[in-house]
Image (cartoon, rainbow, N blue to C red):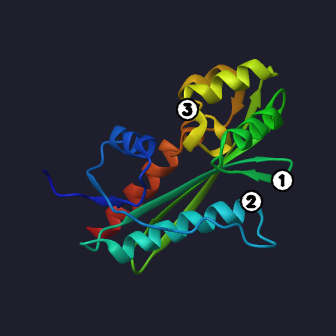
C-alpha cells in the first residue's frame, strides 16, 4: 500500500468512494463524535461544527501528522434538521415531509491538522416529486433509507424521487468533489 496523503474521519462508504474517485491516497481513521444539535445553533452552524468535530477527533487519533478530512451531511426542510432516521416510522415521517416540495441538503467538509482547520459548506436545493404512501413504504422496505440523512439516497433508489437539484449532486451524496479537491490540494501544497 502506498503512503497516504491524508486521513478520512468517516465510516461512510459513499465518502470513501468519492475520495477514491478524486484520486487521493488515504486511510480511514475511526472517530466517535456525538451528533447533538445545540440550542440556538442554525442548521448551517450545526453541520459545520460536526464536520470540524469529526476532523479534529481524527487529528487526535491519526498515526501521522497528515491532514484529516471530516464531513457531515444534513437535510433541512422548514428550518427542521432531518438526520438519519431512528426507525421506520421516523423515516416515513421524513419522506412524507419531503414529498412534493423543495428542501436543502447541507454538506460541510473540514480539512484539519493540529495547526490549521478549514471548513467549507455546500448547500444544494433538492425538489421531490409527490410521494404516495405505497412508494414510501416500498422505499423503506428496500433498506436504503436506514443510514441516510433525510431518509433517502440520491445515488440509489431514492434518486427516482428527485425532480431536480440546484447545486452539487456530489454534496447530496455526501462529499462535494470540486470543493473537497480544492481544499485537499491547498493543504497538500502547504505541506511541501
**Taking 174 as reference, is 70 above or below it?**
below
Residue occupied by mark 2: 43
Left or right of 54 in this view: 27:
left
The reply to whether discs 2 and 1 touch (Cβ–Cβ < 8 Å) is yes
Which quadrant holds residue 40? bottom right
Mark 2 neighbour class, 10 Å CA radius: few under 14, some 14 to 19, many 20 or more: some
Q: Is residue 92 left or right of residue 54?
A: right
Q: Mark 3 and mark 2: span between their CA atoms?
A: 24 Å
Q: Residues within 10 Å of mark 1 (few under 14, many from 20)?
A: few
Residue 115, horizontal then vertical, whole percent: 41, 81
* Vertical placement of residue 42 versus 132, above or below: below
Q: Please identify the quadrant where the C terminus is shown.
A: bottom left
Residue extending farthest to the right is 78
Q: Is residue 163 visible?
A: no
Q: Return the disc, 3 or 2, that comes first in the chain's sequence.
A: 2
Tell me the mark number nearer the camera, choosing from 3 and 2: 3
Residue that mark 1 sits on: 79
Mark 1 residue element: loop
Residue placed most toward the observer, 61 or 121 = 61
Q: Nearer the viewer, residue 29 or 182?
A: 29
Which residue is tagged 3?
A: 144
Residues under labels 3 and 1: Cα distance?
Answer: 24 Å
From the viewer's perspective, is the residue at label 3 or at label 1 nearer?
3
Q: Position of residue 104 (x, y in %)?
A: 74, 43
Amino acid at each position: 500500500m502506498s503512503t497516504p496523503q491524508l486521513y478520512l474521519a468517516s465510516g461512510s462508504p459513499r465518502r470513501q468512494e468519492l475520495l477514491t474517485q478524486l484520486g487521493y491516497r488515504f486511510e480511514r481513521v475511526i472517530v466517535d463524535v456525538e451528533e447533538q444539535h445545540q440550542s440556538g445553533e442554525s442548521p448551517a452552524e450545526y453541520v459545520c461544527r460536526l464536520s470540524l468535530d469529526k476532523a479534529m477527533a481524527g487529528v487526535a487519533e491519526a498515526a501521522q501528522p497528515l491532514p484529516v478530512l471530516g464531513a457531515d451531511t444534513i437535510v433541512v426542510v422548514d428550518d427542521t434538521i432531518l438526520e438519519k432516521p431512528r426507525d421506520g416510522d421516523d423515516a416515513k415521517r421524513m419522506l412524507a415531509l419531503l414529498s412534493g416540495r423543495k428542501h436543502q441538503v447541507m454538506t460541510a467538509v473540514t480539512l484539519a491538522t493540529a495547526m490549521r482547520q478549514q471548513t467549507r459548506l455546500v448547500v444544494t436545493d433538492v425538489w421531490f416529486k409527490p410521494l404516495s404512501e405505497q412508494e414510501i413504504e416500498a422505499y423503506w422496505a428496500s433498506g436504503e433509507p436506514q443510514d441516510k440523512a433525510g431518509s433517502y439516497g440520491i445515488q440509489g433508489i431514492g434518486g427516482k424521487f428527485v425532480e431536480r437539484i440546484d447545486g452539487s449532486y456530489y454534496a447530496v451524496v455526501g462529499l462535494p468533489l470540486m470543493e473537497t479537491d480544492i481544499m485537499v490540494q491547498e493543504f497538500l501544497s502547504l505541506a511541501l
